[in-house]
Amino acid sequence: MSKALNKSLVKIEIYGNTDKDTEIIHGRLLGMVTNDQYCAMLNDKSLVNRLTTVSTKPLSDVAKLMNVADMRMALVIKKRNDVPVSRRQVFFSAPLDMISSIFSSTDMTAVAKNGTFMIINEYEKGTGETTK
């Protein structure tokens, strides 16, 4: 794995279907998990701990998937709503319905089953962290 890939982070802007504020998550992309894998992790926290050791995945790996229905994006959170996260936390998106647009290998949008809309961008660590 290249050093640049180790320094890449993903920013997910989550727009809900309610009056809640937009949530912005910055983190290291671990990949996609199925609902079965997600449920297993809810029942066994050691699986989540093991997941956090997985190497960073490029966003282009997600874009290549033919079917993301009912899958969840998994990230190790570095920053949530401009507040750094000091301890290791894993963010799981809502189950996806589809990837609605792929603009490039580092920019896409997705729609979750619960109606939320996500803008997903990959960036080099230190270059996209302050953007909202």
Image (cartoon, rainbow, N blue to C red):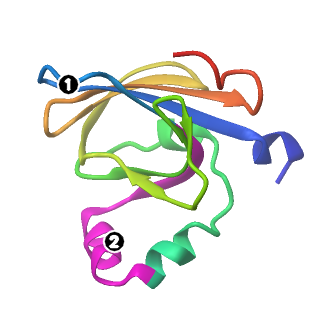
Count of picture labels: 2
Residue 37 is marked as 2
Vertical comparison of 52 with 85: above or below: below
Classify residue 130 as left or right of residue 101. Answer: right
Classify residue 54 as left or right of residue 90. Answer: right
Q: Residue drawn at (86%, 47%), measured in percent from left and top?
A: 2
Q: Residue drawn at (14%, 19%), measured in percent from left and top?
A: 19
Residues under labels 2 and 1: Cα distance?
Answer: 28 Å
Q: Position of residue 67 (x, y in %)?
A: 32, 45
Classify residue 83 as left or right of residue 1. Answer: left
Q: Residue drawn at (77%, 28%), measured in percent from left and top?
A: 126
Q: Does the magenta stretch include residue 89?
A: no
In front here: 31 or 20? 20
Q: Mark 1 points at which residue?
A: 20
Q: Residue drawn at (25%, 63%), measured in percent from left and top?
A: 35
Q: Which image quadrant: the N terminus?
A: bottom right
